[in-house]
Image (cartoon, rainbow, N blue to C red):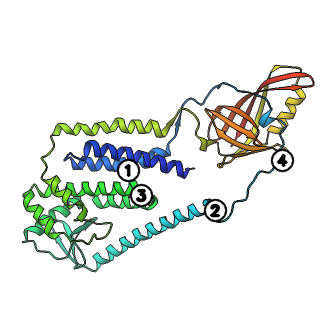
Amino acid sequence: MIHVLPYIVEFSFCLLVLMGFYRLFLARLTFFGSARIYLLSALVFSLILPLFNFQFGVSGNLPVNTISSIGIAGSQIIKDGSESIPFLSIQVLLPALYFGGLIWMLARLILGLFRTIRLIQNSEKKHYQGFEIALNPAFRPASFFSTILLPTLDLEDRQYQQIMIHESVHIREGHSFDILLVQLVKSIMWFNPLIYVFENLLKEVHEFQADQQVTLSYSSIDYSRTLVQILNTNRGLQLLNNFNHFQTKKRIIMMHKEKSKESKKGVFLFGIPVLAMLFFLISCSSGVDRSQLVGTWTGSDFEFEQTEGADMSAMIEGGKMLHVDGKLILEENGNYQIVAGQGDMNGSGTWELGSDDILTTFDGQESTAYSIVSLTDQELITKHEVAFESPMGKLAGIITLTYKR
C-alpha cells in the first residue's frame, strides 16, 4: 500500500532536484529534443522511484537489547486505549479536500477534451502535406494531436507558412501526448506547485523545438515578427500547443541564441549520477521502513533461550500460549495492541521504529525495544532479552518471536 504523505514528499524531492539540474545546466543549451526527453524522464522517474523500496541489512541476527520486562510475550494487561475520532476531524477534511480537487481537475480535463473534439468536428476540414487542418474562427493557431487548428488559412501568406511548419513539428513530435500526461499528473498532484513549474518548462521546450525548425527555412528576425503579430491575450485551451503569451520573449531570445556546440551534449550524461543518487536516497534503505510494520501480525512461533536462573519451563509454556495465534496490532497512528492467543487483551501503548528496532512504551510508562531479526511482507521475527527478579532469584533469557502477516 502506498502511504500518501511520504510518496508526495519523495515525488516532490525527486522532481525538485531534477528540475534544478535542468535549470542550472541544461536550460541554456539549444538541444531541445534532448531537453524534452530529459524532462519527461524526470517526471516518470519522480513518479516511479518512491514506489520502490530495496532494503539492505535487515537479515540475520541483530544486537539484542536488555529490558526489564517480558514485553510482548509476558503478562502485561491491556486497557482499551482506542479513541473516538470526531467526524469533522482532519482525517476526514483532508481526504475530502483532496478528492474534491481531484474530481474538479479531472472534470476540467475531460470537458476540455470533449470541447476541443467537438469544435474540431464542427469545423471546416482541409488537408495539406499529410496534415489535417481544422478551420474555425474560434481557434487560434494551435495543434491538437494530429490536427492543426487555425482561424483561417492562406497558404500564399508567409506567416501562415511559418505557422504550418511550427504546428507540424508539434504533431510529428507528439507534443500533445506530453501535455496530456502532465495534465493527468497535475490532476492527481493539483496541490503541488512543482508540477505547475514543470508544466511551464516542458511547454517552453516544445515551443523552442518547433521554433528551431521554422528558423531553418525562415530568418529568425522574420519569424520573430510573426510571433509578435499573431499573438493575442487569449491563452486558449490547456491541451493545445499554441503561441503562449508568457513564452514569447523567451522564445525570441532563444531563437537568436547561438547554437550550442555538439560537444556540450555530454552535459546531459551528468543527469545519470543525479538519477543514481536519487535512486539510492529514495528507493534504497539500509533498514526497515515504518510502513512495512503497520498492520496486524499473528504469532506463529515462540523460542526462549535461558541464560540465567532456575528452570523456567512452566513460564516458557505460558508465554508460548499467550503468543501463538495471538495478535500484534501496530497502528499507523503510533498505537499498538496485543491480543493473547485465547483472545484476551494482553498489552497496549505506543510504538515507533528505531534503528532496526520496534520501540514500544507500555501504558505510557515502561519502554521495551525489540530487535528486528528479519522482515518480509509476510513474516516478522524479533528478538529481545528479558531479565527480572522472581521468588527463585534473577531470571534471564532471550526470546525470539515469529509473526505471520
Image location of residue 373, percent across then percent down: 66, 30
The answer to whether the residues at label 1 and label 3 have Cβ atoms under 8 Å apart is yes
Q: Which mark is residue 185?
A: 3
The answer to whether the residues at label 1 and label 2 have Cβ atoms under 8 Å apart is no
Q: What's the residue at 89%, 20% (across, down)?
A: 310
Q: Amino acid at mark 3?
A: Val
Q: Is residue 30 visible?
A: yes
Image location of residue 340, percent across then percent down: 82, 43
Residue occupying the far right of the picture: 391
Q: Quadrant of residue 87?
A: bottom right
Q: CA distance from mark 4 to mark 2?
A: 32 Å
Q: Earlier in the sequence, mark 1 or mark 3?
A: 1
- Which callout, 1 or 2, points to the residue nearer the camera? 2
Q: CA distance from mark 3 to mark 2?
A: 28 Å
Q: Amino acid at mark 2?
A: Ser
Q: Amino acid at mark 4?
A: Gly
Q: What's the residue at 64%, 42% (across, down)?
A: 293
Q: Earlier in the sequence, mark 4 or mark 2?
A: 2
Task: Give the answer, above or below, for where 393 lies relative to 315.
Answer: above
| Residue at the spot of label 1 | 43
| Residue at the spot of label 4 | 343
Q: CA distance from mark 3 to mark 4?
A: 46 Å
Q: Is residue 217 visible?
A: no
Q: What's the residue at 71%, 43% (across, down)?
A: 350
Image location of residue 239, percent across then percent down: 32, 66
Q: Amino acid at mark 1?
A: Leu
| Frontmost residue, 25 versus 52 | 25
Question: Taking 245 as reference, is 345 left or right?
Answer: right
Q: CA distance from mark 1 to mark 3?
A: 9 Å
Secondary element under disc 4, as helix, strand or loop, is: loop
Secondary element under disc 3, as helix, strand or loop, is: helix
